[in-house]
């Protein structure tokens, strides 16, 4: 199993990941096509900055999965085949309970009043477009055993890890 | 190992999944008074509104349920528990032995004892059957009175408005959603609901429901009558502890559980609306009857029943609503004491969308204890996580939050945790 490793200390804030993400979640999967689509594709990664430090935010697949527990519709779930937290758009009612608890604040609203978040590029066979687009390798898609500890981490662990890299 | 779970709603289902994950050979028996596979009570008003079909209420697909290999006894009303012989009794006379037992019987709607409350069109809303009965008599142009201004009441009001009814909500206090919102936020929501034709009557009590054979009107303390074809009573919920009162369980309002969600009886656990579990903000065991707490407790209880030793991090009050496009999220303490070190910061913005945008932060010293967001609720979870972290926040973080930019604090936080 692979996981996203985020090394925010090398992020330069160029937002290439944001663009690549929107394109990857468009109908056409091309930059120009994406701009022409009637419903603008939504990016699912957000680069936040305080002017000095940049921080790419996307679903971090939290160990305690607060979004899955908060979801009153069974839409936010653990996909048994991939082990990833995913949204089932057919079940989502747009109640925003998940938004209330996602510590990274990365769940947004899709075109038909549904929760949308990073799905690790399911439609690209789980080869995340943001990773390919990142020029500084701040985003990497690595085998889980590259991580020191077990695969999933909590919010605080993520922040601590970011710190250790800095 | 033989597990008996009482209840197949939020807490029961998440417990069953968690047990199955730990223990593939477990025998899991589920006893439930419900006659349906696990469904979401929270979505019943969406169904009533016509926003979703009935099939969307069910939490898991038939295949997913099958993969759990549960033995479910539907329509099975549990009447007692004997901790010495480790059995659970059902009202039908059956009994079920357990090695580990989970009580996840949830809560029931509180009914109203006033003249006329037994008329056929007076309802509470807790079960799918309640909604089926209400649905059968709703028709555009009819009038409904909802007693109480809490979440279930307003969600019901929304559903009936969407079905074309004329709806009145009668609230005994001076604001709607008094548990979830401070007065200013409640006012913003009230204005929005009134624009969508809801009639809200504050500071008023219903003294009787009138009608011969059928509901015709609701009488208020003021002497006024509101015409009504149906009445929904939303006066809160009470934990379903009744079957266990003589079992030796420690029960206050709910069943008391420790940080592992164990009750005082060996191998008996409790989770969800029926349990009084640790509340991280009030620093005591407390009822917190909301969905996320029930599922989280169910998962942790299930894991602990099957041999792990997970600690429940604690509940807190929180909720998210979306009425006709106006979104509100409220978490933690929203009505703090008025004296220091407690402090609130309120920010009003006019949003492009036409909806009001409002943010309230509640501080105890430099520690965030609660918030309310109206209009723009994006990134609310970052604030929730900051409350859960329960640590004083640095000035740059506090300033960033004050400006209404929760996600921009993450870069700062990096430097804050160690
Ligand atoms: C209309 C409505 C809207 C809501 N909206 C929200 C919302 O927006 N956000 C939110 O957080 N929460 C909401 N809630 C609350 C939420 O539904 C509950 O917190 C949640 O269902 C609690 O789950 P539970 O498993 O503890 O208990 P319950 O859902 O109450 O289920 C109890 C289970 O125990 C079984 N049972 C009870 N007694 C017995 C017995 N004697 N023998 C056998 N089985 C028994 C029942 O059949 C059922 O399966 C809403 C509730 C309602 C009714
Ligand atoms: S809480 Fe947010 S970051 Fe964590 S798994 Fe859910 S969506 Fe992903
Ligand atoms: S918005 Fe959708 S995914 Fe999020 S909690 Fe509500 S139903 Fe679940």
Image: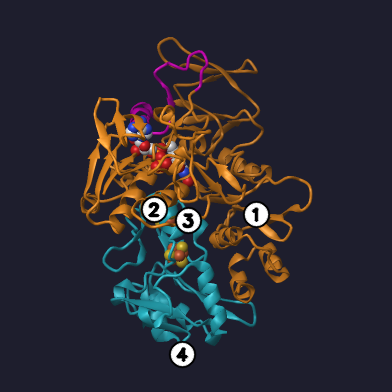
Chain colours: A cyan, B orange
Q: Nearer the viewer, mark 4 or mark 1?
A: 1
Q: Gap in Å between the C-alphas at discs 4 and 1? A: 40 Å
The boundaries of the magenta stretch are B112-141
Ligand 3, what quadrant?
Answer: bottom left
Residue B45 in view, yes or no: no
Occupied quadrant, residue B140 = top left
**In this view of the protein, which residue sits in the foreground, B372 or B17?**
B17
Q: Gap in Å between the C-alphas at discs 2 and 4? A: 45 Å
* Image spot of residue A91 (x, y percent): 34, 53
- Residue B128 magenta: yes
Q: Which mark is residue B304?
A: 2
Q: Nearer the viewer, mark 2 or mark 4?
A: 2
Above or below — where is B115 with respect to B351?
Answer: above
Local crowd size for mark 4, using a 10 Å CA cut-off: few (<14), some (14–19), many (≥20): some
Numbered disc 4: secondary structure: loop
| Residue contact at pointers 4 and 3, CB within 8 angstroms | no
């Amino acid at each position: 199993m692979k996981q996203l490793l985020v090394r925010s200390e090398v992020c330069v804030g160029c937002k290439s990941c944001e663009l690549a993400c929107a394109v990857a979640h468009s109908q056409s999967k091309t930059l120009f096509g994406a701009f022409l689509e009637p419903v603008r594709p939504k990016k699912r990664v957000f680069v936040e900055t305080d002017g000095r430090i940049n921080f790419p935010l996307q679903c971090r697949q939290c160990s305690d999965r607060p979004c899955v527990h908060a979801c009153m519709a069974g839409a936010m779930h653990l996909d048994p085949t991939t082990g990833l937290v995913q949204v089932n758009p057919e079940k989502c009612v747009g109640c925003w309970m998940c938004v209330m608890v996602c510590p990274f604040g990365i769940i947004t609203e899709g075109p038909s009043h549904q929760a949308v978040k990073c799905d690790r590029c399911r439609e690209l066979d789980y080869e995340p477009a943001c990773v390919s687009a990142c020029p500084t390798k701040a985003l990497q898609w690595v085998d889980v055993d590259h991580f020191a500890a077990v695969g999933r981490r909590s919010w605080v662990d993520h922040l601590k890890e970011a710190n250790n890299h800095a | 190992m033989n597990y008996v779970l009482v209840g197949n709603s939020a807490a029961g289902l998440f417990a069953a999944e968690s047990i199955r994950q730990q223990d593939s050979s477990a025998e899991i028996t589920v006893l439930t008074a419900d006659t349906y596979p696990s469904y979401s009570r929270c979505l019943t008003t969406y169904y009533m509104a016509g926003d979703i079909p009935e099939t969307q209420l069910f939490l898991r697909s038939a295949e997913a349920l099958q993969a759990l290999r549960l033995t479910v006894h539907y329509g099975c009303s549990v009447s007692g528990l004997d901790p010495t012989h480790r059995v659970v009794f059902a009202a039908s006379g059956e009994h079920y032995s357990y090695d580990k037992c989970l009580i996840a019987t949830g809560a029931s709607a509180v009914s109203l004892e006033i003249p006329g409350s037994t008329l056929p069109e007076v309802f509470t809303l807790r079960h799918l059957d309640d909604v089926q009965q209400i649905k059968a008599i709703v028709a555009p142009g009819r009038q409904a009175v909802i007693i109480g201004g809490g979440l279930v009441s307003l969600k019901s009001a929304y559903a009936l408005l969407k079905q074309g009814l004329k709806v009145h909500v009668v609230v005994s206090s001076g604001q709607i959603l008094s548990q979830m919102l401070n007065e200013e936020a409640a006012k913003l929501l009230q204005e929005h609901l009134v624009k969508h034709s809801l009639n809200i009557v504050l500071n008023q009590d219903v003294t009787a429901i009138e009608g011969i054979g059928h509901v015709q009107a609701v009488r208020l303390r003021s002497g006024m009558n509101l015409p009504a074809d149906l009445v929904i009573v939303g006066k809160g919920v009470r934990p379903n502890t009744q079957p266990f009162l003589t079992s030796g369980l420690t029960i206050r309002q709910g069943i008391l559980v420790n940080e592992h969600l164990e009750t005082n009886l060996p191998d008996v656990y409790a989770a969800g609306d029926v349990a009084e579990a640790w509340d991280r903000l009030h620093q005591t065991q407390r009822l917190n009857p909301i969905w996320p707490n029930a599922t989280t407790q169910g998962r942790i209880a299930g894991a602990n029943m099957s041999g792990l030793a997970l600690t429940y991090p604690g509940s807190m009050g929180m909720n998210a609503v979306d009425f006709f496009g106006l979104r509100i999220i409220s978490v933690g303490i929203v009505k703090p004491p008025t004296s220091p070190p407690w402090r609130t910061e309120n920010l009003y913005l006019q949003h492009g969308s036409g909806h009001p945008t409002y943010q309230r932060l509640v501080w105890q010293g430099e520690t965030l204890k609660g918030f309310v967001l109206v209009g723009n609720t994006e990134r609310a979870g970052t604030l929730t996580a900051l409350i859960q972290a329960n640590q004083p926040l640095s000035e740059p973080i506090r300033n960033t939050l004050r400006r209404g930019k929760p996600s921009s604090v993450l870069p700062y936080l990096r430097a804050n945790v160690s």
